[in-house]
Amino acid sequence: MGLLTSYHEWLKVADTALPQNFAGYILQLCLSPLRSKPFATDSYDNPKEIAKCGKRIGKRNFLPKLPERDGERPEMLKWMAPHRQATQRTDDDMHELLAQAIDELVAKHAVHVVVKTSPMEKSGDAILIKDDIETPHAIAKQNKREIAHVHVDGGHGDYSLHLCLSPSDCKEVIEKKWGERMTLAGSLVPTNYLLIYTPRTKEELEIVKMIIEGAIVFMTGARELVQ
């Protein structure tokens, strides 16, 4: 594939996390040496990585043992950014259910979270740590206090999510095939920064909702526990 053809392919999926022009395309190519191993979990046992999460919660998990996700993992777009699913995309009904689930979680944890424009994606809504809460650990600081966002992309997204979990929860999610490390995890974003695959069924939605809640509790400093 020629450079110009490749560029036009990228423009079809480019989002505002990078400039939507040729400079943005070249930048994502230049980031390729930083690509993380999507299913590697060794770093989540690294004491230095655990310490970044704070002494009080670095070794804790906020998720129960998860069931294994059915079937194969989705295929991903080849680009460094945006990090999106190429297969196993879902329909509007499931997108609406996911939005409702997130609204419920934001209402439940309203003392500790707020919805604002994503500082990581630079557009679209994200769940963030509420302004009056002190940044609880280095992961939250590196992630600009953002907890999670859904890839809506103006209604044309894959409805996967990016979020941060505790190290032990990262292992659980990756090993049970609910997600993978973001392409830049461990370099420009925290090692804990994962992509969660979009839920395909109501049963999967309940698991994804549980994962989002685990991210909320971890990123707000475990001020409340998942019930």
Image: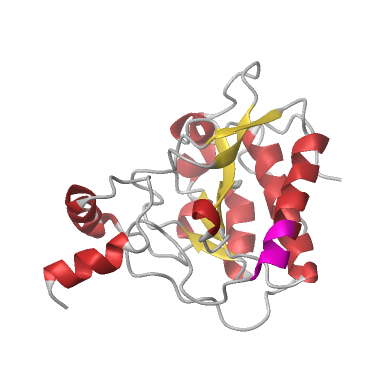
Residue 178: within the magenta?
no
Q: Residue at x 80, y 70 (%)?
A: 203
Q: Can residue 151 be seen in this view?
A: no
Viewer-nearest residue: 145 or 158: 158
Left/right placement of residue 83 relative to residue 218 reads left
Q: Residue 33: where, in percent of width, then height?
A: 22, 58
Left/right placement of residue 25 relative to residue 165 reads left
The magenta region covers: 91-96
Q: Which residue is drawn at 75% across and 43% down?
A: 103
Left/right placement of residue 198 relative to residue 209 reads left
Q: Residue 119: where, in percent of width, then height?
A: 46, 34
Q: Residue at x 80, y 36 (%)?
A: 107
Is most of the magenta stretch helix, strand or loop?
Answer: helix
What quarter of the picture does the N terminus occupy? bottom left
**Farthest top residue in view:** 132
Q: Which residue is drawn at 67% across and 65% down?
A: 92
